[in-house]
Image: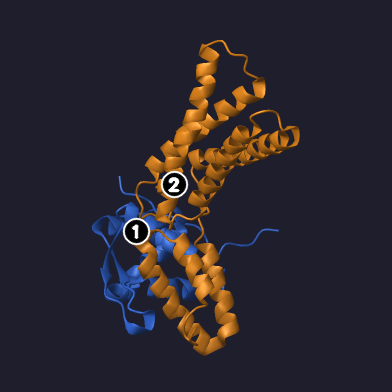
Amino acid sequence: MAELVGIFEQIVLLAVLGLDELAYGRAVLGEVEDALARERSVTAGAVYTTLDRLEAKGLLASRLEEGTPERSGRARRFYRITAQGATALNTTRSTLDKMWQGKPWPLEVLA
Amino acid sequence: MTPNTPPRSLERVLLLLLPAHHREAIAGDLQEAYAERATRKGRLLANRWYARQVLSLAPQRFTLAEHLLMGLTLFAILYGSWFGIMELVLRHPGYLGREAISGTILLQAVLTLLFLALPGVASLRFLVALGCLPLLYLVSLVVRGLVHGADIEGYVLLMAMCLASQSLLTAYVLRRRHSPGSLTSGA
């Protein structure tokens, strides 16, 4: 059975997906910061820990590439979604869509 | 420090916190982001942002075994200090030997806490593993005393039990943390 991913994991996976070939740590952090700027502040710890966990679960794969002078030659770690990651995102989305079916949107705020 | 590089002291802390596998990439990412922020918002705000990111990368999630080890280690600091202070005050014959025991207990406790907090320092792993040996030796002395019917005080027995548990848990945590690349503790 395919894995369901949590909301923050989905955001990180979608950031990686959106960045495509340019999905290295800092770019992912920037995307997630932009996505959540109004909702809450995002820290590097949250993003890198999630990237690490997703990689450990096999939903992401990473490779190191040479660094540039503006980062003192430190390597960049690029991420890409694996087939397992794509399946997990699909399953999560279809599960949520199914659950939302027939429900009003946006929900009325009850006092 | 040049205008576009993070404060060196904070960067050093970051490097201590990060496991070797991630050190270069994350430090480079944050350096890039810092430079961009410093240009856009000024050094002061960039420094504050960088400090926050460094703190966020400190180990925050510990496994149950690590929590237990932390508890036992803090308890070891308590009884190790108490034992050392009492021996220093009473100065019974041979107290220097017991001071050495107290020092060993405290040193191992401090090393263990540092090991848990700073996954980026590989040498701590070795020192903590090495530090289990004198603890187990102390436990073996108490066990030998018990076997030979020596009169052993209750607090010594309690300390020996705690030291034995601490050593076993340390070995377990060291084994679990053998994957040096993980940012999440105990993975």
Comparing marks 1 and 2, which lies closer to the viewer?
2
The relative height of residue B68 versus residue B41 in the rendered view (above or below) is above
Residue in view at x 47 percent, y 40 percent = B131
Foreground of the two, B179 or A47: B179
Q: Amino acid at mark 1?
A: Leu
Compared with residue A49, is residue B43 higher up or lower down, i.e. above or below? below
How many C-alpha atoms fall within 10 Å of the one at disc 2: few (<14), some, or many (≥20)?
Answer: some
Q: Amino acid at mark 2?
A: Leu
Q: Which chain is blue?
A: A
Locate the C terminus of chain A and report the quarter of the image it occupies: bottom right
Q: Quadrant of residue B173?
A: top left
Please tell me in which quadrant of the rendered image residue B18 appears: bottom left
The answer to whether any part of residue A94 appears in the image is: no
Q: Position of residue A69 (x, y in %)?
A: 34, 84
Residue B136 position (above or below residue B28): above
Q: Position of residue B20 (x, y in %)?
A: 36, 60
Task: Identify the residue position indicated by label 1 in the image.
Answer: A89
- Local secondary structure at mark 1: helix
